[in-house]
Every structure is written in structure tokens, then in C-alpha cells.
Amino acid sequence: MTDLQRTEVSIHRSQAHGTPPPKESGAPATTARPARARRVRRRGSRTTTPLLALITLVSAFPLYFMVVMASRPNDEIASLPPPLTPGDQLDDNIRRVLDNADVMFVQAVMNSFIVAITATACVVLTSCMAGFAFAKLRFRGRDVLMLAVVVTMMIPIQLGLVPLYMLMAKLHLVGTLQSVILPFVVSGFGVFFMRQFCLQTIPDEMLDAARLDGCSTWQVFWHVVFPVLRPAAAVLGLLVFMERWNDFLWPYLVLDLDHPTVQVALSRLSGGYYTDQALVMAGTLLGVVPLLAVFVLFGRQIVGGIMQGGMKS
């Protein structure tokens, strides 16, 4: 007996006994649930969108205000209330920064690019290899070595400044860019980060299949593991590049006056008895532009890589 026949029989029985036919209670509930869900989504979008817009404006306001200060003269910067619209002296202030012989800003930008790119490439490569080894290879003392790597993350960098400086002095590297690059070619955070990503995204069956095909350990890493690690490597590379670009204390200690980085050059702009605020803001704007360019060019690939890695896991 079909559902339609059962319904007709129940209606006839109810009419014979004088009782009202049963109501179809399922239909209103099924139609009410999607409508209720749509109302909840609309309420959520009405509150979430303005909140996200407010957070975006608050986050972007310091960058906008930096542009305003970099395009104004010093007397307008010190005025009350401060100006909130860009001025017409941005080109002049940038030209004064680039023409300042004591700062050597162009050379500082080139030095920062060399340091940041070299350190980023080294950290990404060593972290991928070490993370793969700690996650998928079995050898004696693996857990103890991984614990030592984690412990290094708990030690502040300030505690190692004096030993590092003494080591660079014995290697006769003080005053050169090598002294800024060598201490940071390996990162404990990078090793731990890539190890966790390997554990979550790379199954052991994939490695066993590659070994059955005759691949060595290096071939397994380069042809099987590293393509899977690219999303995490992109995120790690962006973090390391930003850290090396913004580093000030260590380059300030070991570099001489002829080999500054961007942050050291910016400190020279604000030195002396009188600080030219327009000049400092223009130099800061020039120092931020490369970071913004890196994020704009590779931000979509990085976010897409994170989503891809999350779906694989």
C-alpha cells in the first residue's frame, strides 16, 4: 500500500467515526526551518559585515595617517588638531630621504632585501627538511632532539646577543651582512611548524608507495613531500621575511655605518637634537612599502595554500 492510499484510508476512517482528519504536521516544520535559518543568516550578516568593516578601518588607519604625516611639513604635523587629509609634499619628503648621504637609504633597502631573502630561503629549506625528518623518519634520539628544538623557542633572543657577537667577532664577520644572516638560517619555530604540518597532511602510505617505486629519501622529500609542504612553506616564508625585514637590534649591534639595513637607517633619521618628523614618516613609508607589496603579490596564493592544506588534512 502506498503512502497516498494510506492517507485516503485514514481520512475515510476519520469521517466514518466523526473525527477530523489528521493534520500533516511534517510539512509546516520543513518549510519553517529553512525560513528560520535564512532569518538567522541575515541577522548574522547584518552584524558581521559592519563589525568587519570597522575592524578593517581601525587597522588601516595607522597606515593612512602615516601617509598623511609623510605628505605634510613639520609645522602642520605639530598643529592641533592634526591634519587628516594628505598634503602635497610627499614627493619632496621622499626625495629628501633618498638624497640624505648620512642615511644611505637606497643601500639600506638593498641590504635588507639581501638579508631577508637569503634568511627566508635558508629557513624555509632547513625547516622543511628538518620537519619532514622529525615527523616521518625514525632515528635514535629523535624525540630528545625535537624537545631541544622546542626549548630553543623559549629562550629570548636577547640572552644570546653577547655570545653571538663574540662568535661573529672570532669569525671576523662583524660589520658585514653575513653576521646578520648566519645566526638566523635555522628557526626552531619553523622546524616545529613544518613538523606539525607534515604530521597532519602527509600519510605514511604515500611515503611507502614512493619507496616501493624505488625513490631514495631525498627523492621522496623533493618529489613527494615538498610539493605538499608548499602552502605551509609560503606562510613560513612570509613570516620570516617580515621578521628579518623589521629586525633592528641585532643589525644595529653588528653592522657598521657603511652597511645599514632599513631599520638602522630609520633610526639615523630620528637621531640628533632635532627630529624631522616629516622625514621620519616618509622613510617609514618607504620601509613599509616592500612588505605591503609582498603581501599584495603573494597574499592570495598564501591564503589559497592554507585552504588547500586544510582540506587535505
Image (cartoon, helix red, strand yellow):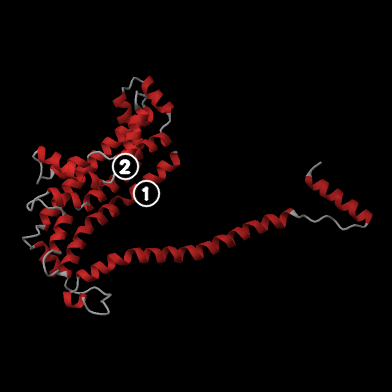
Question: Is residue 221 or residue 26 the one in the foreground?
Answer: 221
Question: Is residue 137 or residue 95 the one in the foreground?
Answer: 137
Position of residue 208 measured from the top left corner of the image (x, y, whole percent): 40, 23
Q: Which residue is located at x 29 percent, y 66 percent?
A: 62
Examine the rendering and report whether any part of residue 218 can be seen.
Answer: yes
Residue type at tag 2: Met
Q: Is residue 107 left or right of residue 232?
A: left
Give the secondary structure at mark 2. helix
Q: Which residue is located at x 31 percent, y 42 percent?
A: 153
Q: Is residue 72 left or right of residue 234?
A: left
Q: Which residue is labeled 2 in the image?
A: 153
The alpha-carbon separation of the residues under discs 2 and 1 comes to: 26 Å
Position of residue 78 measured from the top left corner of the image (x, y, whole percent): 21, 76
Position of residue 237 measured from the top left corner of the image (x, y, whole percent): 28, 44
Q: Quadrant of the N terminus?
A: top right
Q: Quadrant of the C terminus?
A: top left
As displayed, is residue 93 above or below residue 187?
below
Question: Is residue 47 or residue 21 the one in the foreground?
Answer: 47
Q: Which residue is labeled 1 in the image?
A: 303
The disc, 2 or 1, on the residue closer to the chain's N-terminal end is: 2
Question: Is residue 216 or residue 263 the one in the foreground?
Answer: 263
Examine the rendering and report whether any part of residue 73 can be seen.
Answer: no
